[in-house]
Structure formats: structure tokens, C-alpha cells
Image (tube, rainbow, N blue to C red):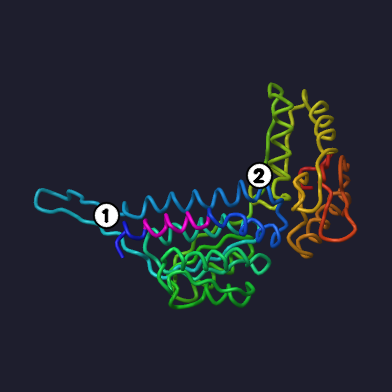
Amino acid sequence: MPGSERGRIMMKYADLVEQHAEELTLLESLDAGKPRMATRAVDLGTSVRSLRYFAGAADKIHGETLKMSRQFQGHTLREPIGVAGLIIPWNFPAIMFFSKVAPALAAGCTMVVKPAEQTPLSALYFAHLAKQAGVPDGVINVITGFGPTAGAAIASHMDVDMVSFTGSTSVGRLVMEASARSNLKPVSLELGGKSPLIVFDDADVDMAVGLAISANFFNKGEACVAASRVYLQEGIYDGFVKKLAQRMESWVVGDPFDPRVNQGPQVDKVQCERVLSYIDHGKREGATVLTGGKPCGQSGYYIEPTVFTDVKRMT
């Protein structure tokens, strides 16, 4: 199929995702506990833009002609790599689906997509819409399952030509090892991070506080680029901390379908217990709990937004 035709189908695919944004928003909120309003604006909006961007690139993938000498020219030809294994995390199911699927479609690849076992619903719906858009059968194949079985099968399969994985560093190592032990398929990894936010004395404190809150608590803190460490220059420390505590008092945790809510539940019991263990570790290290620090609500995996002060370097 020529690139222009792939691009046309991808544009139709994007239109269908946009038309079904309400159903997809509900699925994402049910699956991942994301606040409905933010999911519609951020997750689905980003997904549609990503699909359209790569649709526009589909007919612009070409090689180069290189002048080697007076007698010779070199030519490069870009071809689809083949079958792409795409393993998606649970924190941004829709965004990550299209950040992997869209470029693979544009390049002319077929793919096997494994969504996280915690959040498979939107990927299955996206596969349904792909068929409606005219994506040929067998191009986008969504399989559900657990990492040690379905994910490992993708990473080690001899007929998978490359793997793109987003997730933890420990699992990324396993994916790379399985790829090397099988057919030495290339691997693209996006793994965990530990990002700092640094605020100097000359900063607008109100703006910096707002940025610190969004950088830490957007998507319940379930983001690989969450600014989980905030470094403050001494001159603004007290004022920053005071304003941060005040702002966090109005941060609403609860039902993700309630438009007043800023933060929904953690994605599952395992993640909830993991976050609570980090909080307990901080307390044992001697850090001071400025806000939060415990579960909230009568049921579900809700955790108060937690801010520590007086932390040690390795807390």
C-alpha cells in the first residue's frame, strides 16, 4: 500500500477516534482512574493529534541519493522493518497506544500490540475503530495478557522484527535480554525517570507552586517525568512551602467522573500499596509530612496528595 493511501486511512482513523471520544474517555477513566475532564482534553486530544501528525508523514518517507565520487552515486531506500511488537504501559493507555501504533502505521509495518493488563479496554476499542477506518486485517493485532507471558512472548518471538516497550527499568532489561537471545531484534525503550524541579530566588513563587503541583500530581503522579523532587533556593523556601501547603488543601481526591475532582484512584492495589510503601519509607527516613501521607476514602485505591519537607538526599 503506498504511503499516500496509508495516510488517508490514518486520517480517517483519527476522525473516528475523535467522533468516539466520549466512549473512549469513559473507558480510560474506568480502566485507569483518570479524571474524566482531563482524559478527554489531554489523553484523547493528544492521541488524535499524534495520529494525524504521522498520517501526514506517511507519504514523505524516502531515501537519499548521495554523491560518492565522480563515477558513483549511492542510494538509500527506507523499507518497513516488518512486524513491530508494541508493549504499552498503564499510565497513559491511549496516548502510548498511538505514540507507538501511529509511526508504525505510517512506516508500513504490521504490529502486535499488548496493552497493560490493568488497562486494556481502550486498545481493544482502538482496534475496532481501525477496522472501520479501513486498516487491513492483520495490520493492528491487539493481544491482552500479562507481562511474563504475553509480553515475554513478543520480546522473544523470532518473527517479531523490533520491540518498543514503555515501562519499568527492571522489565526493560528483561525485554532487551529476550530480544538479544532470540533474533537480536532492535529494541526501543522508554523507562522510569526521577526528574527534579529547581526553583531559584528570582522565580515567580505562585507560578512555581502551580507548576510543582501539576508536575507532581497530574495523572495521580503516575508519570515517568513526574517532578518528584523539588529543590528550592533558600531565599524562597519558607514562602514556597507555605503557599504549597495552602494550595494542596483545595486539591480534591475522589470519583474521576466528578468534574470537581483533581485526582482519582491509583490504577490498582499493587500500585496503591507501592506508593504507600514509599510514603512509609520517607517517614522512616525522618522526613516531615507537610500534607497528606495516608489513604483516603471509604473504599478504593485513593491516596492523599503527599508532600515531604526536611528530606535527606536519598529519601
> For mark 1, does the 10 Å Cα neighbourhood hold few (<14), some (14 to 19), or many (20 or more) residues?
few
**Residue pointed to by mark 2:** 195
Q: Is residue 16 left or right of residue 78?
A: right
Report helix, strand or loop for mark 1.
loop
**Residue pointed to by mark 1:** 63
Q: Nearer the viewer, residue 23 or 261?
A: 23
Magenta run includes residue 294: no
Q: Position of residue 16 (x, y in %)?
A: 50, 58
Residue at 77%, 25% in the rendered image: 236
Report helix, strand or loop for mark 2.
loop
Magenta run includes residue 8: yes
Provide the major secondary structure of the magenta segment: helix
Which three-letter amino acid code belongs to the residue tagged 2? Answer: Ser
Q: Nearer the viewer, residue 237 or 126?
A: 126
How far is mark 2 from mark 1, CA to CA?
A: 37 Å
191 vs 198: above or below: below
Which three-letter amino acid code belongs to the residue tagged 1? Answer: Gly
N-terminal-most mark, 2 or 1: 1
127 vs 92: above or below: below
Q: Which residues are magenta?
A: 7-17
Residue 301's quadrant in the figure?
bottom right
Residue 122's quadrant in the figure?
bottom right
Contact (CB < 8 A) between labels 2 and 1?
no
Q: Position of residue 291 (x, y in %)?
A: 86, 42
Q: Position of residue 102 (x, y in %)?
A: 46, 58
Residue lying farthest front? 19
> For mark 2, does the 10 Å Cα neighbourhood hold few (<14), some (14 to 19), or many (20 or more) residues?
some
